[in-house]
Amino acid sequence: MRNKLWTAVGVAVLMVLVFVAGWKMGQSPGAGAAPKAASVPIDARAIFVPESGQIDALRRGVPVDQEGHPPAIARVENADLKRVRAYPMQPPTIPHSIDGYQVDRNSNRCLLCHARANAATFQAPPVSVTHYMDRDDQFLATISPRRYFCNQCHVVQTDAPVLVTSQFRDIDSVLAQPATQAAAAPATARPATPAPAQPAAKE
């Protein structure tokens, strides 16, 4: 009986100690504080070039243990001007805002203007004929179900600067570069390369 009493007292004391320790830790000034934002405000719209050792350019130089200032919400370009494609077969980008457009299984707002039957009326680029082909390359009377959801491939553009710099060049500029350099270089006569000596025939 005495052992059970001492066991109960020990458990009660232990529980009190754990409670007091937890309560003290909860009252410490650093506990539960929100992550401190970066001390130096970083322009979220500026292009950040990572330094050596910086592996995440998307954090814009903010240390991992700090929280950066959120970037400003970019404005969707709504100039309605056709953009040049960056590479062959690139899906054209959408040159206007599509806020409020319904594109789901019941309705596709894009086809009101871009369907081939309506494109001339609305002066909109018609949907490519490939969008009317099924998986067996057979032409359908309406848009193929696999091409129905336009924003799977076509997206709007914003005025936000890129966070990671890119040196991508399309194939046309790559192929045109040698011809341009050759035309710009002065014409100089190259010395004739001597023909390699032929081995003497054995007699």
Image (spheres, helix red, strand yellow):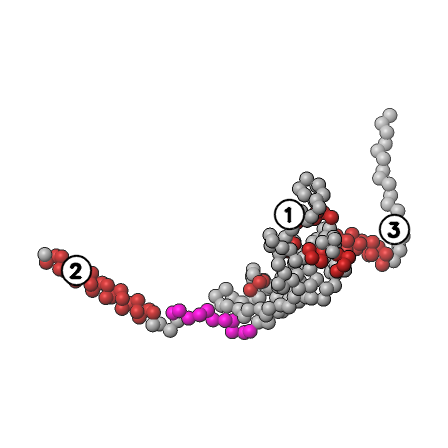
Mark identifier at residue 41: none
Which is more N-terminal, label 2 or label 3? 2
Q: Amino acid at mark 2?
A: Ala
Q: What amino acid type should be assigned to the residue bearing mark 1?
A: Pro
- Is 32 included in the stretch rendered in magenta? yes
Q: Which residue appears farthest toward the left when viewing the image?
A: 1
Q: Residue at x 58, y 62 (%)?
A: 57
Q: Residue at x 89, y 52 (%)?
A: 189
Q: Is residue 186 left or right of residue 77?
A: right
Q: Which mark is residue 190?
A: 3
Cα distance between the residues tagged 3 and 2: 102 Å
**Pointers 2 and 1 in contact (C-beta within 8 Å):** no
Could you say where residue 72 lies in the image, as x and y percent from the top left? 59, 70
In space, the residues marked 2 and 1 are separated at their CA atoms by: 71 Å
Q: Which numbered dot is residue 8?
A: 2
The question of residue 115 being in magenta is answered with no
Give the residues in magenta. Answer: 31-41
First-in-chain label (1 vs 3):
1
In this view, the mark in front (3 or 2): 2
Between label 2 and label 1, give the one nearer the viewer: 1
Q: Residue at left 20%, top 63%?
A: 12
Place of residue 70 in the rendered image (x, y in percent of width and height, measured from the top left): 55, 69
Q: Is residue 110 something that shows in the picture?
A: yes
Secondary structure predominantly adopted by residues drawn in magenta? loop
